[in-house]
Image: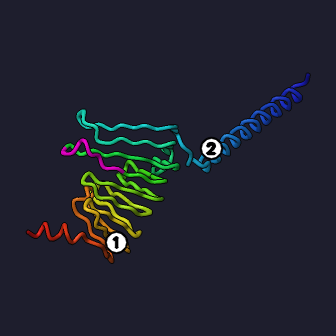
Amino acid sequence: MSLISKIKFKNIAYLLSCAIFFIITSCEEDLTKGNDNKNKNFPSQIINNANIIQRDSGFVTLKAKAPIIEKYELIDSPYIVAKRGINIEFFDKKKPKTPGKITAKYARIFEYKKFYEAKGNVRITTNEGQRFAMQSIYWDQKKNRIYTRDTVFVTMEDGSTLIGANGMTAKDDFSEYTFFNSSGDINSKKLSENQK
């Protein structure tokens, strides 16, 4: 083999290895670009027949049941969702035997923002026995406020009723609330007893 053919062979081998390197590198770059565009909005955890108990210093503060709970952690604003409904009991240390209750057909929790929403036939019963009915409600835990723009129907323990046609805002323990465009039927017998 002559010196010229050896040099040509080395040049061809060198060029071929360079071409393979650039092809592999470009393929890797394409794979990286493809991964950035992939949809990450899928549940990282799924709990079937969820039965959750939350405690604070041994005291049960909350019990929640849901057919399915999904946790979405791989996105910018992670959240937990109960798409097939949820049933929650919340307990007050002052009245541990009479828990408040919330039921809804759908619920979503943004843990980092401390923001909760419930939708679809929402029913709330407070520890005091007041019953609230609406189609959606939102809870901003950082501000300790609950609000809705839906029509709210409230039945008091004595049977009197209130309607907030344009929604309401309330403290999250329902110790205070404001109805927008309200009307109602107040138990006059109970009112006269309280005035004596």
Whether 144 is drawn above or below 27: the answer is below
Query: Which of the pair 44/131 is nearer the observer?
Result: 131
Whether 3 is drawn above or below 36: the answer is above
Q: Residue at x 42, y 58 (%)?
A: 122
Query: Which of the pair 128/159 is nearer the observer?
Result: 159
Quadrant location of residue 185?
bottom left
Residue 98 locus on image (x, y percent): 26, 46
Q: Is residue 68 left or right of residue 13?
A: left
Residue 30 locus on image (x, y percent): 68, 45
Q: Residue at x 54, y 43 (%)?
A: 43
Q: Is residue 27 left or right of residue 111?
A: right
Q: Amino acid at mark 1?
A: Gly
Identify residue for label 2: 32
Q: Amino acid at mark 2?
A: Thr
Identify residue for label 1: 164
Q: Residue at x 26, y 51 (%)?
A: 127
Q: For the view shown, which residue lies furthest in the right direction?
A: 1
Q: How many C-alpha atoms fall within 10 Å of the one at disc 2: few (<14), some, or many (≥20)?
A: few
Whether 54 is drawn above or below 193: the answer is above
Instruction: Give whichever of discs 1 and 2 has the lower sequence position.
Output: 2
Query: Which of the pair 58/27 is nearer the observer?
Result: 58
